[in-house]
Amino acid sequence: MPLKQLKIQHVRNLDDVSLSPLSRINILYGENGSGKTSVLEAIHFLGLTRSFRNSQFKHLVSEGQEQALVFAQADPLATGQAKPLGVERHLDGQVRARYAGSSLGATDLAELLPIQVINSDTFDLLDGSPGVRRQFLDWGAFHADPAFIHQWRGFKRALKQRNSLLKCGKIDPRVRRVWDAEFIQYAEQMTALRQAYIDQLKPDFEAALGALLQGIEVRLLFSPGWDQGKGLEALLHDSFERDLRQGFTSLGPQRADLRFKVGTLNAADRLSRGQKKLVVSAFRLAQGALFHRLSNRACIYLIDDLPSELDERHCRQFCEFLQASANQCFITCVDPAYLSRIWQPETDVALFRVESGTLTHRGAPGDQE
Ligand SMILES: Nc1ncnc2c1ncn2[C@@H]1O[C@H](COP(=O)(O)OP(=O)(O)OP(=O)(O)O)[C@@H](O)[C@H]1O
Ligand SMILES: [Mg+2]
């Protein structure tokens, strides 16, 4: 279990709160506006130095404060020994992250604390732009293979360089050949890692989907961003005049997508809201299951308002999947009545009551009866 204790300072309406002891499944309940989502944001901040809400960092910092700070006793590498992990970020832009006494950069921190969010923006994975799906694909490829980040950075550099040459309008053919060769090399290597990740993920996705939603078959189709049968070199050559007119590169991994298909239709056009939530959740839970299989480490799941959009049966199936997984989960809800009685007695569950920015540990379900 990655997080043993948490201390949050100056995150939205959470002035100074502690969550201790943490369990594998942590349920946070309370009225609207009490601070439940803010706790999830604070944990996200601990792993990624930013919120998952689509807003600027300054909105995360409590009004009138200069910085947000989250501190944990953590064992993200599953060594059996918790060590201090702290992240603080000032409004002036300074970020400091430390684990076990050493400073960490953003990439090391993201690698250390793998986090997945399931919330009302979850639908974006089906309904949103390919960019959203590429982010999820790359989250997985990043955690699955240490070579990915190197390829990804090299590719971004080559793409940026090629696009700025295209924008200039006049390109020396020798310079173009050099950058195209670099672009193609990184594009192919990065795409091979994306493809390998999807191939590994498919069985986990099928298993998670079968557990969460029965009777619907969803296929994952990876499209790399160009026709691999024709080859990237030939296609870049053919599209060069168009790229020059547009001022950017029209083909390559920057155009990759992951399609979710039900029969011949896109899942986005075919499924109900509850079904969409379950399909996307199955995808994200499959990513955590694969991560655990590859690394023997657990993922942290931040699940905001788990029961929304779901009937009792699907909510129970969702919780059964979490129960059987290795994940550490932070689940919010308004009314804890149903979510507190759904777990097997041996499951490590804790309830936290959230009230106007304060948290009370209520023990395991049944302790209050
Ligand atoms: N920067 C900020 N400083 C202080 N308070 C803030 C800040 N940003 C938001 N808040 C307040 O923090 C409170 C907690 O918000 P949060 O979104 O965590 O509530 P919630 O418990 O998830 O509610 P809901 O059930 O409606 O989703 C809200 O009352 C909100 O107005
Ligand atoms: Mg909320």
Image (cartoon, rainbow, N blue to C red):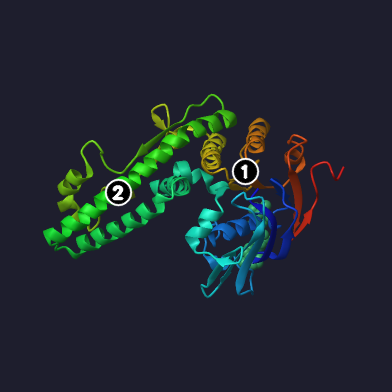
Q: Residue at x 63, y 54 (%)?
A: 40
Amino acid carrying mark 2 in the image: Ala
Element carrying mark 1: loop
Instruction: Please say if 320 is above or below 178.
Output: above
Element carrying mark 2: helix
Q: Residues within 10 Å of mark 2 (few under 14, many from 20)?
A: many
Residue 54, can we see it?
A: no
What is the quadrant of residue 194 in the picture?
top left
Residue indicated by mark 2: 187
What is the quadrant of residue 47 in the picture?
bottom right
Residue indicated by mark 1: 327
Image quarter in which the C terminus is found = top right
Q: Nearer the viewer, residue 70 or 34?
A: 70
Residue 285, percent from left and from top: 55, 40
Q: Nearer the viewer, residue 305 or 255?
A: 255
Residue 7, percent from left and from top: 69, 62
What is the quadrant of residue 168 in the picture?
bottom left
In the image, taking residue 161 as reference, residue 149 lies left or right, namely: right
